[in-house]
Image (tube, rainbow, N blue to C red):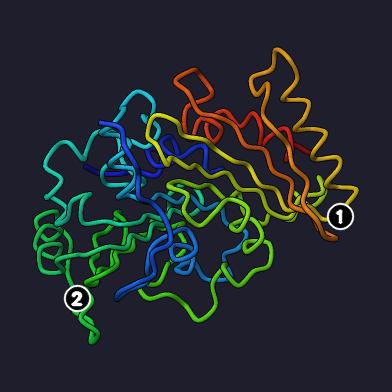
Amino acid sequence: MRMTRKCVVTVLVGALGAAGLVSCGADDSGDGEGTGLTAALSGVPASQAEQAITYRDVSAARRLVAADKSLYRGLDGYGIIEFMQGAHTARPRSYGFEAKDVTASVLLSNGYSQRLTGTFDVDAVRKAMRKRGYTATEGDDGAVRLRKKGQADIEVSADARTSQYVDGVKLPLDPPDRSVTDDPAYKAVVSCLGDDVYEASLYGKNPGYRKQGITLLGIGGHADDAAHPTEKLCARTTSEDAAEKVAAELRAKTAPGERFTGAKVNVGDGDTPVVSIIWKNSTKPGMRPTDQDRTGELPMALLRP
């Protein structure tokens, strides 16, 4: 499948750009980078803090989609560009890996850049992409670079795979010395969302958002029980006055008759409080997991000029 930039933008427009317990989150035991939102964001250089970032705990997302395709249809593809729009159901090995090989996905901007972590058979990826017309170059570190004119550039190692289109940011296979996790705004929002979210969208430190009193906004989902998922919006504000304004905007969305009736808004402490709202997901339009990324109802109420 040739993933054009038009296709990527369509799939990820929200990025601005048998039920049971679901295991997601920050288990940093063993080798590699560990799991969880912080571990995934550690692969994004600090210089890219203004980018919109979409995260998927792929292992958890696969279980949730299997449990209820209707409720979790927004997770179909698991944040893996190559497997979106049904491609993961048709010859996934044509890319040299499968969704079960991936633990986490991070996408920047509208999907122009992707970093997957997991367990990859480098030789299988090389062979599969050669069949697709890619040229392979071996690296001294055991990684393989794959190139094809007009297509995404790809690099793969035993535990990571990156890809980027012409307009995309080059993400490293190995975590950089400084990542967005070192940024105070990201630390605050990730702490609010919880490291064990199975999906998250961080809207980037767009300088224009500061005019609305917000440094960084993120939305993330939890599903201890696949039948009862919740989502949470967290916004790190620029001041106590800004926090009260943001909280008022969110409370207006919880009034009787509004989509988020009954949801609670919380204002944190400090000079730059984090304001949050948590709601229950359902199969109703606008209330499924990741629906807010698509409709923008809550984010745009806070970030609009």
Q: In this orientation, which residue lies closer to the viewer: 45 or 228?
A: 228
Q: Classify residue 119 by image quadrant.
A: bottom left
In this image, 282 relative to 72: left or right?
right
Q: Amino acid at mark 1?
A: Ser
In this image, 105 relative to 258: left or right?
left
CA distance for labels 1 and 2 = 50 Å
Q: In this orientation, which residue lies closer to the viewer: 205 or 234?
A: 234
Estimate the x, y position of residue 163 in percent, counting from the top left: 34, 60
Work out whether 286 lies above or below 108.
Answer: above
Q: In this orientation, which residue lies closer to the viewer: 16 or 230?
A: 230
Mark 1 vs 2: CB contact within 8 A: no
Looking at the rendering, in which quadrant would you find the C terminus? top right
Estimate the x, y position of residue 6 in percent, counting from the top left: 41, 39
Work out whether 197 lies above or below 66.
Answer: below
> Which residue in the rendered view is the most extreme toward the top?
257
Under circle 1, the secondary element is: loop
In this image, 55 relative to 89: left or right?
right
Under circle 2, the secondary element is: strand
At x 21% / y 72%, what residue is drawn? Answer: 158
Read off the residue under disc 1.
239
Q: Classify residue 257 by image quadrant.
A: top right
For residue 11, which numbered disc appears in the image? none
Work out whether 172 lies above or below 124.
Answer: below
Q: Earlier in the sequence, mark 1 or mark 2?
A: 2
Estimate the x, y position of residue 150 in percent, counting from the top left: 30, 54
